[in-house]
Amino acid sequence: MEYGYDLIVVGGGVLGTFHAYHALKHGFKVALIEKDRTPQGATVRNFGQVVPSGMNSKWQTYGRESLRIYKEIQETFDISVRQEGSVYFASDEEEEQLLEELYQINQENQYSSQLLTKAKCMERYGGLRKDYVKAGLFFPEEVMVEPRVMINRLHCYLKAVGLDLFLHKTVIECNKLSEGIEVYLSDGTTLTSAKVIICNGSDFKTLYPQLFNESDLKVSKIQMMQTKPQGHFVLPSSILTGLSIRRYEAFSECPSYAAIKAKEDADSPVKKWGVHILFKQAMNGSVIIGDSHEYADADHIDDLNMDLKMDIDNFILQEAKKIIDLPTYEIQNRWFGLYSQCKTSDIYQHTIKNDIHIVTGIGGKGMTGSAGFAKENINNIFNLQHA
């Protein structure tokens, strides 16, 4: 039979969209289906920091490929990519030691980074508190995007090169035929395809509830804030701090990491709420600050209180003010995001009858890792490894 499409991707967030992108690059006919008028999930509820530096060796490889892809697209079509680099600030000798060890790992991996003295950090970053910073590690190749701008512009770019985009359409059924798959939408539309990739956890839950309930997915709730514009104050680079050094997977590969983590207070608010402090200046001059992490099993998402917890926000602001003196910490927006991840693996993948592929649970790696991971996954799904 002739298929309407070579590939239908369900879920228009960053993971699904980059699967569509790579399939289009191979010349496939692709449809992308998004249940909302514009993506509403984790893709648009994050900092927009593309930071392979924070990932373990496996995912740093995907992240570095993502950097190349973001920059390649930006050369052709403005999707809000800014190459301003990322910097980690150590607040004590332990964190400084971890920065030095990660720098050595980067040298071996041929990933560009620069150790910064305390004086150099103070010189480069206005507002940085002298009583906080001990040293820094700068990654010049890393970029930032405006998440809500980026995903919609990426959709526009892909439509221009052949993508069929179905917005505000819900997939209610996928039927595997003797050849190909029929996909039924809530408005009565039927599409056919050789393969389907489901990258939206909500659609996964709707289409395959038993499989969803049996999965090892858990959901993380993160809280973030946005200040009012900071006038003429400029915060160069994405800012990651000592708590990020103590949390991110990249540092777990450092020789001293386990011993340093073992000494931490297990009952602190940092542990209770999964807090680490990040700063990113948006294009309008405001600064985004966060974040926190509260967890629940995916089939018990109601256990997560859907209100914003002011105790968490207040703690984040309290810690942020110890790091950078912004002209204003007046908050204009607060929000939370939800993202899914696996308990026992780094991403959830399950294949149904050879041609329906569920790919979700990428966790906090989505903005950084999706473009590179999706390239490899499309090659695997379509047996293009040697193309």
Image: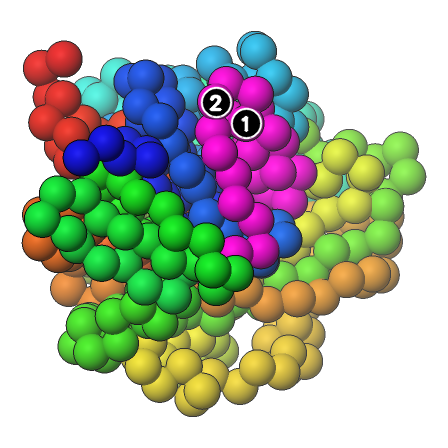
Q: Is residue 321 left or right of residue 185?
A: right
Q: Quadrant of residue 260?
A: bottom left
Residue 173 in the image: state x and y as whole percent: 32, 64
Is 353 one of the magenta-colored residues? Answer: no
Q: Is residue 243 visible?
A: no
Quarter of the figure with the C terminus: top left
Q: CA distance from mark 2 to mark 1?
A: 5 Å
Residue pictured at 22% horizontal, 41% vertical: 195
Q: Nearer the viewer, residue 162 or 149?
A: 162
The region drawn magenta spans 146-170
Q: Is residue 167 magenta?
A: yes
User: Does 173 sit left or right of 120 as displayed?
Assistant: left
Asked if residue 308 is positioned above or below residue 126 in the image, the reply reads below
Name which quarter of the figure residue 380 lies in.
top left
Give, as a three-letter code, the residue at label 2.
Answer: Gly
Tell whether 192 sits left or right of 36.
left
For image coordinates 33% across by 76% down, the residue present is: 298
Q: Which residue is mark 1?
A: 159
The structure residue drawn at horizontal position 50% and vertical position 18%, both measured from the top left corner, is 161
- 182 up-or-down from 74: above or below: below
- The residue wearing badge 2 is 162
Using the rendered view, name the quadrant where residue 372 is placed. Answer: top left
Classed neighbour count for the residue bearing mark 1: other residues with Cα under 10 Å, few (<14), some (14–19), many (≥20): some
Residue that sits furthest to the right in the current view = 231
For the residues labelled 2 and 1, say whether their Cβ atoms are less than 8 Å apart.
yes
